[in-house]
Amino acid sequence: MSSFDVEYWREVLRGVSIPFNHPRRDSLLIREKVVEGFLEGYVVPQGLIAHGRGEAFDYLIGETTIEPAIEAMKAAVALLLISKHPVISVNGNVAALVAEHVVELAREVNALLEVNLFYRSKSRIEKIRDIFKRYGVEILGTDEAYECTIPELFSERRRVDCRGIYVADTVLVAVEDGDRTEALKKMGKNVIAIDLNPLSRTALTADITIVDNIVRAFPKMVEIARELKNKTRSELETIVNKFDNRSNIAKVLEHICNRLRDIASSLMNKP
């Protein structure tokens, strides 16, 4: 066996059966999807690390969608609906876990999809493009002929589609790095982030931060979009203007602190 044999690990995965009564079944199935994306070549090893880091924060939250996240989702969807040129940025992890729901959300809010990668390669871009093609969507960011550059950003994420993120007024990012969020803000764009780490630069820099797992956030946002589509522009603007991102993040941190305090208390009081 070579240092990393893809077929060997595929065979290992095929031999694993997760029992229906396993207490971590849902989490393990999600991990399997990310690993499969890695074996297929569109999720990078660093993406596995990012997923694990997010899962750790999900434990602290309680692996559930909390009320501050719902509030942020409503504001995010309202902002997408009133935006002139909204774009949803996708990467390997997003493609592996929620491609179908991302497409549904994009259709509901009339947003474009664009692939944007820190670890960029032609092969990864093509594989992610093909995943979204299965759902009848052509994504931007796959043609170098339409390539523009985000100022003051020096990673491969600086390369964006001139028809997409470059001219967008609102960009939704998930599993993101803080550098690009800061650079997008400097360009005058609204940034919506889905980030399980409420203390990340992305979370603290974005206009609206949804502290939730993408596997729960995107389906819920589709539901919310279908509810809010019939609202007037004035009603949607009111939802956006009432939202305070830092206050919302503080609510998330309070939730985590209270939850950990309750768990610690129950452990100390056990006979």
Image (spheres, grey):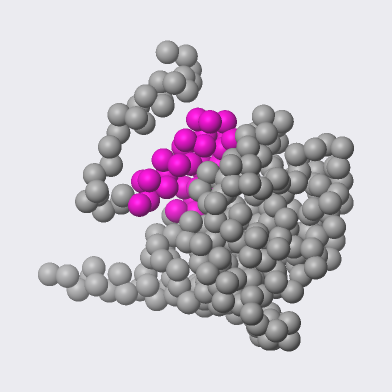
Q: Is residue 139 above or below residue 220?
A: above
Could you tell me residue 257's position as x and y percent? 43, 73
Quadrant in the rendering for residue 237: bottom right
For residue 139, side relative to residue 35 (left or right):
right
Part of the protein shown in magenta: 26-55
Look at the image and say whether residue 200 sits in the magenta stretch: no
Could you tell me residue 198's position as x and y percent? 56, 65
Residue at the front extreme of this rendering: 136
Quadrant in the rendering for residue 256: bottom left
For residue 255, say whether it is visible: yes
Quadrant in the rendering for residue 102: bottom right
For residue 178, side relative to residue 99 (left or right):
right
Could you tell me residue 36's position as x and y percent? 47, 35
Q: Is residue 248 above or below residue 147?
A: below
Q: Determine the residue positioned at 57% across, 31% down.
A: 41
Residue at the top extreme of this rendering: 1
For residue 201, say whether it is visible: no
Which quadrant is home to the C terminus?
A: bottom left
Secondary structure mostly taken by the magenta-highlighted segment of the chain: helix
Q: Determine the residue positioned at 44% across, 55% down.
A: 56
Q: Is residue 65 above or below residue 99?
A: below
